[in-house]
Structure formats: C-alpha cells, structure tokens
Amino acid sequence: MRAALVRAARFAARTLRGEWYGIVVDPVRELLRRGLSGLVLAFVAAFGVIFFHAVAQHPAGAVAVRVLGGVQADLPLWLALLRTPVSLYVPALDLPVWAGITQLFLAFALAELTLGRGRTLFISYATTLAGTLTVRVMIALGPGWCGLGLPPQAGQVLDTGPSAAVVGLFTYLSVVRRAPVVFFLTGGSMVVESVVKPNLAGREHLIAVAAAIALGVLHGRNTRWLPGRAALAGLTVREEPPVPASGGGGRGGGRVDGRGGGRGGGGSGPGAVVPWPAGAPGGTDHASQAGRAGQVLARGARTTDACPELIRGKGE
C-alpha cells in the first residue's frame, strides 16, 4: 500500500512538473526570446473585442456589428461562414466583457507562444466553427433524440463571442502538453456549466472541447493538413549531408574542380576517378573521366559546404 502511494505521488509530481514547464516555463522562455512579437494574436483578439464592444454601445454601431459578425443558426450557411471570423470578436450579450478579456488574452498568448501563429488561428476557428455547424445539425434533428435535438427557436439565438475559441485553445494545449490541471479547469468547467445551466452556449462549449480533444489526439501524427506541426516541438528540421566513404589506396584521385586525375591510382575518396563505362564516348580518355567525375563532385560540394571532407581535394 505504501509503495503504491509513493508511486502515485511520484507520478503526480512528474505530471505537475511537466505541466509547469509546458504551460508556464516554456512559453515564458519563448516570450523572452521573441519579445512582444510573440503576442500579436493576443493583442489583436483583446483589442478586437474591446473595439466591437465600444461600437455596439451606440444604436447605429450595434446594427453594424450585428450585420458584420452576428451569427444565427437560421441564417444561410454561406452567410454564417462569412460572419464567423468576425463573430469571434463580437462579445456575447450575456457574458461580462472585461472579465473575459483576461481569459481571451491568456489563451491566445499561450497558444501563440506554444503552437505558433498559424496553428493558433486554425484551432480557434475550427473549434468555433464546429460548434456553429453542430448546432445546425441539432436544430435539424428537432426536439427529442435523447436530448440532442433543439427546437427551431434556438436558431434565432445570437451566437457570437470568443468563448468557444478560448475553451478550444485551452483544451488543445492541455492535451498536447499533457496538462491535466488546465484540462479540468477548462473542459471540466464547461461540463459543469452545461449541466447547471443548459443553454445553446453550453452545448457549443462542449462541442468545442470535443473538437479540441480530437485535434489534440491527432497532433504528432502524419497530419500534413494541420499547420505549424514543427512549431509545437520547437524543433528545426535539418538535413545532414551524406558522409563520403574513406579513400582506399592513394590520396583520393581527381581534383574537385575537374582539372586533373589525382595523385593516387585506386582511391575511393571524394576525389577518386570514377571509371567510365566501356564503349561510351570518351571512355579511353583518362582526363575526360577525371573531368566528368570532378564536375559531379563539384556540384555536390556546392550544396554541402558544411562538410569539409567533400572539398578536401582542393587544398591538396
């Protein structure tokens, strides 16, 4: 029993330590490296919500905001898709604006520093769009269906705000960074919200959580359609030049510039003379053989400057 408790405590400590580094330490290091340029999306999202909130305080501005970013399930699909990107910045009417801006800024800041700009935009838009489209399916099903369907009146509810994107980003980060505390504070709170206060927004939040989990599970696999795959790991893929085989007899035949045959006769190093096929033009001309082999090696040396073995013949 004691050994099991010790193993559980060690596992919890490793998990929390990994979450601390994945959610706090690594993003802070990236922020110190990139500076404020790593918070572009966070500032744009926060100021976008503030701007649309200020515009909506006037009657004419409220109409303009509704026309630009008001999404409802009873709208034509093409119009809803056109308004969805703007609807991310239109604050919901039943939620406090200033309290949500902190969560919005933190979600986009962590995501941009951890995932990169392209993947952050993709995840935020995909989770929001998943909720918008799934609500249409629920309305099409109608009431019933074990509580999955919705009445037609739900199509007239204004569906705006960045809450689905915020929940989706936090959930996605918690999955790919293995952060259970963040997951239960975001996805778990959405489940509690949908049970305590069942409404359209609660359903969309649950859909956003499910979509973010699915995308997080797909992360790291061969999903080339997902942008910014190398940004999360912080790795730069480099192709190492091939290492040539060491020479046999002699000091490695012809020169790289193709102007000679070399000092040794049977070398297999970078400067070795490649035998010309029998019967081919120039097959009896030893200088022609060395020249052709030198041209091939010279082209390889120009693309692999980091490998000094390929140009060793020039210094001799």
Image: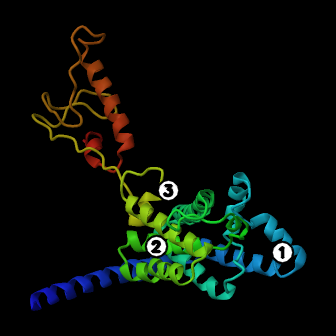
Q: Secondary structure at mark 2?
A: helix
Residue visible at 18% across and 35% down in the picture:
252
**Toward the viewer: 37 or 67?**
67
Q: Secondary structure at mark 3?
A: loop
Q: Secondary structure at mark 1?
A: helix
Q: Which residue is mark 3?
A: 227
How far separated are the C-alphas under marks 3 and 2?
18 Å
Q: Which residue is mark 2?
A: 171
Q: Are marks 2 and 1 in contact (CB under 8 Å)?
A: no
Q: Of marks 3 and 2, which one's residue comes earlier in the chain?
A: 2
- Expressed as whole percent of the image width and height from the top left, the position of residue 220 reads 36, 59
**In this view of the protein, can residue 315 be seen by the observer?**
no
Q: Of marks 2 and 1, which one's residue comes earlier in the chain?
A: 1
**Toward the viewer: 268 or 212?**
212
Tell me which amino acid carries mark 1.
Answer: Ala
The quarter of the picture where residue 257 lies is top left
Is 279 rendered above or below residue 219? Answer: above
Q: Which residue is mark 1?
A: 62
Structural crowding at the residue carrying mark 2, measured as other residues with C-alpha within 10 Å and reported as few (<14), some (14–19) or many (≥20): many
Q: Are marks 1 and 3 in contact (CB under 8 Å)?
A: no
Q: Is residue 45 found left or right of 174 in the rendered image?
A: right
Residue visible at 14% across and 38% down in the picture:
247
